[in-house]
Amino acid sequence: MARVVFVCHSHRPEALALAARGRAHLAARGHQAAVLLAVDGSLTPRAEGTLESGDHPTPGVDEPPTDLAVSLGGDGTMLRTVAWAAPRGVPVLGVNLGHLGYLTEVEPPALEAALDRVLAGDHEEERRMMLAVRVDRREPSAPDGPTTGPEEPVLALNEAVVEKTVPGHTVRLAAAIGGAPFVTYAADGLLVATPTGSTAYNLSARGPLLSPRLRAMVATPLSPHMLFDRPLVLEPDEELRLAVAGPRPAVLVVDGVTLGTLAPGDAVELRGAPVDAKLVGFGGRRFHAIVRSRFGLTDR
């Protein structure tokens, strides 16, 4: 008997209807299913057929083991699902109810067939690199003094962005790579993306497209007010530290979720995460073909 968790976009009634359809299909075959709602950047258990507590369980400790997570929504729902599933080692199947669908694998009519194939072992699991993003805060009374200690890292499948909070002004970010000073950026912000995230905000900022199976980080400045304005590609083990150099604060956004304000002296540390996202596929989607289709690229 398998256990499947459906993660639904909270503002899409069709996602809940699709989850009910999937649960009925699984129950008829002797499997269990639970439903989580993606609400404001976090996942909330739904009352019927889901986790008994409204709190997030500790991965692998106080929850039953899960064999598959199914994302019912767009790429945003997929990001929330992966953030939940990756620390638990659970593979994720994306069902597209959104617009772009870079990350999702199947369309709603194919849900039941996809579930049967996954539970029968007739599928592929593609590993995608994630970022570990950690905030290191300074004492408010002593921005040049010792840190209060790094916070717990947050996982990102697409990107982390440190950006300005004051319209019409830049933010200054002192970048260090592997502990060595590199450059102080004066820009609207700096975006650090995975290869998977290179087709998202990074692409809008004119960053490079990276094949999603690469293991690398790309740092792309946003509207830089300086001569050095090129994206930078780093190895995942090269820690990138971005310290807010002042005088203005910044804000940290991870996979579209705002995590808080950074005061001058605070820093964000980024590197490849110790866990990967596991995305379920059936061999019918190719990254470059998706890019070609989405952008209407044709031969000249």
Image (spheres, rainbow, N blue to C red):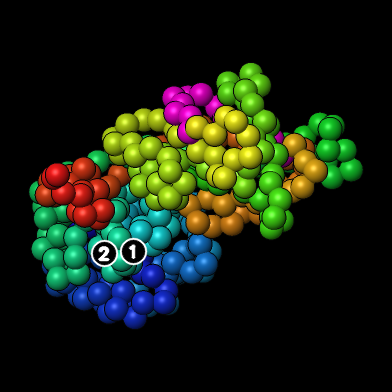
Name the residue rendered at 36%, 77% in the picture.
12
The magenta region covers: 231-244
In the image, 288 versus 153, the foreground residue is 288
Query: How crowded is the residue under tag 2: few (<14 C-alpha within 10 Å), some, or many (20+)?
Result: many
**Going from the N terminus, do you reach mark 1 or mark 2 first?**
1
In the image, 231 versus 276, the foreground residue is 231
Quadrant housing residue 17: bottom left
- Give the residue type at disc 2: Asn
Quadrant housing residue 147: top right
Per the image, the residue denoted by label 1 is 74
In the image, 23 versus 9, the foreground residue is 9
Q: Position of residue 272 (x, y in %)?
A: 46, 32
Name the residue rendered at 16%, 53% in the picture.
118
Q: Where is residue 170 in the image (x, y as percent from the top left)?
A: 69, 46
Disc 1, SS: loop
Q: Is residue 274 magenta?
A: no
Drawn side of residue 22 relative to residue 47, left or right:
left
Disc 2, SS: strand
Q: Relative to residue 75, is residue 185 depicted above or below?
A: above
Q: Where is residue 211 in the image (x, y as percent from the top left)?
A: 29, 36
Quadrant housing residue 206: top left
Per the image, the residue denoted by label 2 is 96
Drawn side of residue 288 relative to residue 272, left or right:
left
